[in-house]
Amino acid sequence: MSQGRPALRRGKLIVVEGIDGSGKSTQIKLLHKWLQARGHQVVFTEWNSSDLVRQATKRGKKKNLLTPTTFSLLHATDFADRLTYRIIPYLKSGITVLADRYIYTAFARDIARGVDPRWARDLYSFAVKPNVAFYFRVPIDVAVDRILGSRAKIKFYEAGMDLGLSPDPVESFRRFQGRVIEEYDRITGEFGFRVIDGTRNIDSQQQQVRSIVARLYNEPGLAEAS
Amino acid sequence: MNPGKDGAKYFGHGLPYADVRDLKGTLITIEGTDGVGRTTQVALLKEWLEVQGYGVIETGWTRSELMSETIGAAKAGHNLNQLTFSLLYATDFADRLEKIILPALRSGFVVLADRYVFTAFARSVVRGADPAWIRSVFGFALVPDLTLYLRVDADTLVRRVLGSRGIDYWESGMDMHLGTDLFESFRKYQWRLIRQYNKMSRDFGFVTVDATLGVDEIQARIRRRVQALLDDRRMQVLSTSLETIRPLLFEAEEDEPEPETAPRIAADEAPARAARGLSQD
């Protein structure tokens, strides 16, 4: 299935990756608007959003029950459920699927948390390969400033507080997400990420994303039309 | 495989962040298909072990704090597929392994697991999972010290289950659409599961117990195997502690003029010395 049989894969699968505060969600929303405006049928799916494990994830986070392995497996279960109901049927029918985070989030974040990299890759071997994976790369300080500036509260697991790196949430976030960046950088070549400099202006990043996506549809005019 | 000397091994890549070097307890798992009598046997075994003075912790399939409600709801909803079915089990298992089984083994308990990873392997594979994939997903699981397999044939099982509590949707594999007839589906599904267990029995070295025997006879056979294992473990522990004391004994003989009392003192001080040595590193 990971080979993505072309006959069954008429729709495009486009994913965005990056740490919290990298700006990936903003970019995928803008891409969504543009594709719709161009007349494409598009659906959007995001990491950790299926109903199947919502209650367990909530409970695990609230009571700090999660270990690196259960954290990873809950997300894999969520992903398997969305792949079945929210991704594969759409791709088969020729609809574009936009995914905010994909299996690479597990490869970067769960490994930064301490699970075995080979185990994580085997775990997700049932996934469909995306047509393109954008990685929004930002230095850790930029991500911290953006998050503190917008919602002023860093979440427990987002900061890797479960790892006991530092009792201070901001410092823990800095160290943990710093590790996640290292992991993303390490796997960029392996999975052929299209790296976007997340410190540039929002609209110039979006121009770059759109020109790469336009080539997927073999519509050279698309990029100019933006 | 875990490099630890005590024989604590994982099925696959293991838990890189967990310390499993010094597991003093014993992990015994009981496997077998639905309605074969596992739970009765686990209860009898637990009672017997406790009477002998062993600390016993029991853990059962899908009983984790994290996942039990979610799995119950998901099964009621009937919208699981092979992947999510397997992964829900894996999450439940990981939670119990890290929160119940490992801490109990570190503290020296006998852990009795009513079903283990083999249940997941059998159920996932009959639903079409790649056997290599599901084994790799559970690669963080500890290899048990003993797996008791209660073996029965499908026809005996059908009569027994019908005669006691009746058959249900999941135990009949109705999600696999083997047919609309509950009885036929149950028989086919259980036959496939049993075939998987029999295959694994060779791969993983199960100790097979004939589950068509009476409850007491099954229990007697189980106890003989468990007794032998626990005697073995005790000998292992004894010889390991002798190994650690031996160099100290010789050292003490050279240092001390009175060899009669030296061994006891040396033995008492051994852990303290080791701890000091470690903390200086």
Image (spheres, grey):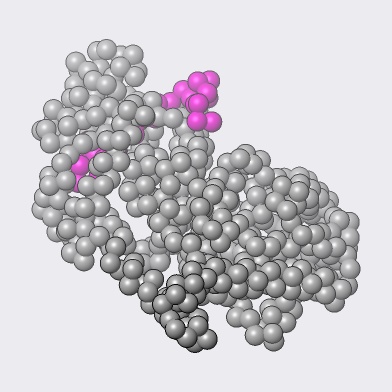
Percent coordinates x, y for residue A26 in the rendering: 21, 40
Task: Please state the extent of the stretch shown in magenta in the rendering.
Answer: A1-28
Between residue B86 and residue A184, name the one nearer to us.
A184
Residue drawn where x is 25% and y is 17% of the image: A222
Q: In this view, does A104 lie above or below B191?
A: above
Q: Does the magenta stretch include residue B59?
A: no
Q: Quadrant of residue B119?
A: bottom right
Between residue B170 and residue B265, name the one nearer to us.
B265
Residue drawn where x is 25% and y is 57% of the image: A159
Percent coordinates x, y for residue B78 in the rendering: 61, 53
Instruction: Give the left or right position of residue B114, taking residue A51 as reference.
Output: right
Residue drawn where x is 43% and y is 26% of the image: A11
- The mark tally for this picture is 0
Between residue B181 and residue B234, name the one nearer to us.
B234
Q: Which quadrant is the C terminus of chain B positioned in?
A: bottom left
Between residue B238 and residue B251, name the one nearer to us.
B251
Q: Quadrant of residue B207?
A: bottom right
Instruction: Give the left or right position of residue A163, taking residue B115 as reference.
Output: left
Q: Does the magenta stretch include residue A23?
A: yes
Q: In this view, does B2 lie above or below A7?
A: below
Percent coordinates x, y for residue A131 in the rendering: 38, 25
Residue drawn where x is 11% and y is 33% of the image: A200
Percent coordinates x, y for residue A203 in the rendering: 13, 30
Q: Is residue B46 visible?
A: yes
